[in-house]
Every structure is written in structure tokens, then in C-alpha cells.
């Protein structure tokens, strides 16, 4: 089995990607979604939780629908704090790395076979408000699943990492404070969401 991960700036993009993956025959048990709670306003049933919350099982179920999305809930991942999440990677991130130097999500991604540098960028993308979709697939299905995930316009993580490094970022820091997007980032997200016809506002 291979692990395929993509980060999305919009929760709606990620949600559509999960729908497509499950309709393509990938079991919900092999799909994960982890979203920064600050973007969960797109999910109308999401409830706010304290930034200081720790541990799992915070808040109620959010989302709706079927498959993986029916199980979305609010919980805390070490190094990220409260997130909207469901799936196999979540259990690894919550349970495996509390106190680990790499942080829960980064450690879980590395444990699932993701390259360390890529895992750092993917983890930072969630910290900065993104939504991560991770899928376990047989080797022969990797190309097909990557194609389906690409339809929904994932973030170019290489370009995004280069931008962050130009601003002084080096790697994912599980001890970093909660991220607050700049006005430029907020405007970029608004523009991208408008371009997708979602009518969503940051």
C-alpha cells in the first residue's frame, strides 16, 4: 500500500476530493481528512472549541453525508490543537506522537511512508488553515487516485514551501503558536473560492 496525500486551501475542495475517492471505490477506512478548525466555518454544523484544548474527543460530530465525512468531528492533535478530522491517519496522529519532537501529524505522516520534508510541509499547511486528504491505496491504484485528487485543485506544496521559506520558515514546529493568516493570504483564499464558484468568504 502507498500513501497519497494532498493539501487543499478550501475545505470544500477537500470534501469534494473525498467524495470522488470514495465513489471510485476506495473504502472510507483508507481515507483521512484533517482540517484546521479555523476553516470549519464552511461546515455549518462545526462548533467552536477552545484553542487550549488537548486530547481527543473534543466537541461533537460535524459534517454529515456518508462515508468518511459522516464521521467528521472536532478533536485535538499534538502540535496543531483543535482540528476537524476523521480517518485512519487521525488515530495515528492523536495517539502516536504526543510529546514527540516532530509533532503528531508530521510523525504520523512519516510513519505512513511520507517523505520527511513533504510531511513537514503538509503539516504546516494544516497549521496555516489548509485541509489535508490522505489515502492508502494499492501500488497499482496510485496513478488513478492521484488523478482524482488533482481534479479538485490541491495546493502546489513545493511552491507554497518556497514561499514560506522566503518568509523565514524552515520546518514544521509543533510548539509554534496558533497561526493567524495575513490579509494577503485571506484575500488569496477569497479569490480562489470565488473562482471556484463557491461563494465562500474567509
Image: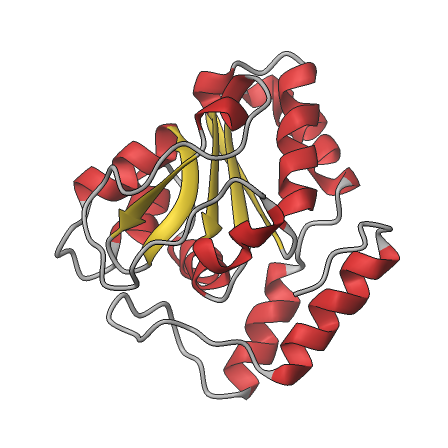
Q: Residue at x 67, y 82 (%)?
A: 184
Q: Residue at x 47, y 76 (%)?
A: 180
Q: Is residue 182 visible?
A: yes
- Image quarter for residue 34? top left
Residue 16 percent across, percent down from the top left: 70, 34
Q: Does residue 113 appear to the left or right of 162 in the view shown?
A: left
Give 38 or 147, whichever is nearer the viewer. Answer: 38
Residue 1 lies, with reference to residue 73, above or below; the image says above
Q: Residue at x 67, y 34 (%)?
A: 17
Residue 121 percent across, percent down from the top left: 47, 62
Give 93 or 138, whichever is nearer the viewer. Answer: 93
Q: Residue at x 71, y 63 (%)?
A: 201
Give 54 or 116, whichever is nearer the viewer. Answer: 54
Query: Where is the N terminus found, in terms of image quarters?
Result: top left
- Image quarter for residue 52? bottom left
> Seen from this angle, which residue lies furthest left?
99
Give 27 or 70, whichever is nearer the viewer. Answer: 70
Q: Does residue 1 appear to the left or right of 10 in the view shown?
A: left
Amino acid at each position: 500500500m502507498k500513501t497519497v496525500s494532498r493539501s487543499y486551501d478550501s475545505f470544500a475542495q477537500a470534501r469534494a476530493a473525498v467524495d470522488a475517492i470514495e465513489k471510485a471505490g476506495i473504502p472510507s477506512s483508507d481515507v483521512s481528512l484533517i482540517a484546521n478548525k479555523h476553516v470549519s466555518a464552511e461546515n455549518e454544523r462545526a462548533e467552536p472549541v477552545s484553542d487550549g484544548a488537548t486530547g481527543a474527543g473534543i466537541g461533537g460530530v460535524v459534517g454529515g453525508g456518508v462515508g468518511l465525512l459522516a464521521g467528521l468531528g472536532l478533536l485535538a492533535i499534538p502540535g496543531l490543537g483543535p482540528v476537524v478530522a476523521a480517518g485512519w491517519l487521525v488515530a495515528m496522529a492523536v495517539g502516536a506522537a504526543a510529546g514527540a519532537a516532530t509533532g503528531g501529524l508530521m510523525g504520523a505522516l512519516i510513519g505512513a511512508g511520507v517523505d520527511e520534508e513533504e510531511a513537514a510541509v503538509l503539516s504546516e499547511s494544516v497549521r496555516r488553515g489548509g485541509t489535508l486528504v490522505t489515502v492508502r491505496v494499492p501500488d497499482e491504484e496510485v496513478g488513478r487516485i492521484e488523478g482524482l485528487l488533482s481534479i479538485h485543485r490541491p495546493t502546489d506544496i513545493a511552491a507554497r514551501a518556497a514561499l514560506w521559506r522566503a518568509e523565514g520558515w524552515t520546518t514544521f514546529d509543533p510548539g509554534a503558536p496558533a497561526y493567524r493568516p495575513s490579509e494577503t493570504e485571506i484575500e488569496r483564499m477569497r479569490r480562489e473560492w470565488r473562482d471556484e464558484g463557491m461563494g465562500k468568504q474567509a
